[in-house]
Image (tube, rainbow, N blue to C red):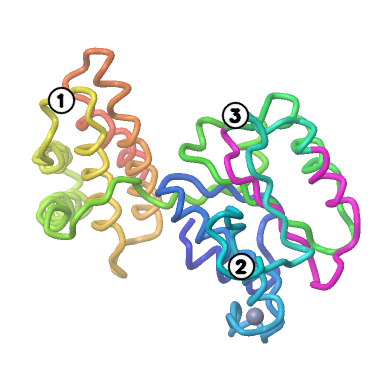
């Protein structure tokens, strides 16, 4: 699933009721949530959503901390953000308050959008309350939940299975100059593999990713983020067939779990070979 696809579904009013926005930086997740909410509630004709100018688009913004406000906060009654209310937890009390609003009809727009800002911090009770709401049939106006989380693995499996996931890529800031050579070497090997089916090219592809700098430190997340970004870039060309594109997206997400495997004592080369082979094997069946 790509951002563009989600935007298109949202503009046509066909977006899944629950969407997980995971990966990326906190800001990237917030931006994606605001953009999707505007698309869902915008007044403009479908092909121009979000217009950025209508009475809905203009008032849907991420809530600012009171201290950093320079002007009165924008407010839209049908766009609600649930922020973490306790130190490390989003409590069931706060979640229930949000869910009570979800039982009402929209005030102004054609639907409602609810955002959970730190979905990984939902208490188990809060997660279950949310899950129950997602399971209820909802017949009146469309109601959308956007769950923002660094890794979707931090959510309950039951919640994951009820939502569409959009991966926003690795969080680390990476430069195009670092990513490009890896993406080219990896992409070249994958093309040769796709054309010939020869497994040796999967090893070459994994070796290309192993060229990311910084693997000496087993705790470092950056080389894995670099490898993930290179994989995403290699799969982003128009010529990439959809099944291969999906496999590369899944591989990029797997790569971000690399440090956890490294800390179990597995050398990075073996992790890379294993992940590449596993995800790409799914493409050829
Ligand atoms: Zn608009």
Instruction: Give residue 120's position: percent from left, percent from top.
Output: 57, 33
Q: Where 227 sits versus 39, above or below? A: above
Query: In the image shown, does 193 or 245 lie closer to the viewer?
Result: 245
Q: Where 144 sits versus 250, above or below? A: below
Near mark 1 (Cα within 10 A), the count class, few <14, some 14-19 or many ≥20, is: few
Question: Which region is colored magenta?
Answer: 96-120
Label 1 sits on residue: 217
Q: Earlier in the sequence, mark 1 or mark 3?
A: 3
Residue depicted at 33% across the width and 38% down the height: 279
Q: Secondary structure at mark 1?
A: loop
Q: CA distance from mark 2 to mark 3?
A: 35 Å
Q: Secondary structure at mark 2?
A: helix
- Label 3 C-beta lies within 8 Å of the nearest ligand 1 atom: no
Label 2 sits on residue: 9
Q: Is residue 166 left or right of residue 240?
A: right
Q: Is residue 102 magenta?
A: yes
Residue depicted at 59% across the width and 84% down the height: 48
Query: In the image shown, does 265 or 214 lie closer to the viewer?
Result: 214
Label 3 sits on residue: 87
Query: In the image shown, does 65 or 160 lie closer to the viewer?
Result: 65
Q: Earlier in the sequence, mark 2 or mark 3?
A: 2
Q: Residue 9 is drawn in which quadrant?
A: bottom right
Q: Quadrant of the C terminus?
A: top left
Q: Is residue 240 left or right of residue 32?
A: left
Near mark 3 (Cα within 10 A), the count class, few <14, some 14-19 or many ≥20, is: few
Instruction: Give residue 44's position: percent from left, percent from top.
Output: 67, 85
């Amino acid at each position: 699933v790509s951002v563009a696809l989600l935007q298109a579904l949202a503009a046509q009013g066909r977006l899944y009721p629950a969407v997980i926005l995971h990966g990326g930086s906190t800001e990237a997740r917030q931006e994606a949530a605001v953009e999707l909410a505007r698309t869902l509630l915008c007044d403009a004709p479908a092909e121009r959503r979000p217009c950025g100018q209508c009475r809905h688009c203009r008032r849907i913004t991420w809530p600012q901390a009171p201290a950093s406000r320079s002007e009165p906060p924008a407010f839209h009654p049908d766009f609600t953000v649930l922020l973490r209310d306790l130190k490390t937890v989003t409590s069931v009390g706060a979640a229930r308050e949000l869910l009570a609003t979800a039982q009402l009809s929209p005030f102004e727009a054609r639907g409602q959008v609810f955002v959970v800002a730190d979905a990984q911090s939902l208490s188990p009770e809060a997660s279950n309350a949310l899950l129950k709401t997602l399971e209820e049939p909802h017949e009146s106006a469309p109601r959308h939940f956007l769950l923002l989380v660094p890794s979707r693995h931090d959510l309950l499996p039951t919640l994951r299975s009820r939502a569409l996931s959009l991966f926003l890529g690795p969080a680390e800031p990476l430069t195009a100059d670092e990513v490009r050579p890896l993406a080219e070497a990896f992409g070249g090997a994958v093309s040769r593999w796709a054309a010939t089916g020869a497994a040796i090219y999967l090893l070459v592809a994994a070796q290309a990713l192993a060229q990311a700098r910084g693997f000496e430190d087993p705790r470092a997340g950056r080389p894995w983020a670099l490898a993930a970004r290179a994989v995403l870039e290699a799969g982003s060309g128009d010529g990439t067939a959809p099944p291969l594109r999906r496999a590369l997206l899944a591989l990029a997400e797997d790569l971000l779990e690399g440090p956890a495997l490294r800390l179990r004592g597995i050398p990075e080369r073996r992790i890379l070979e294993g992940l590449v082979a596993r995800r790409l094997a799914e493409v050829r069946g």
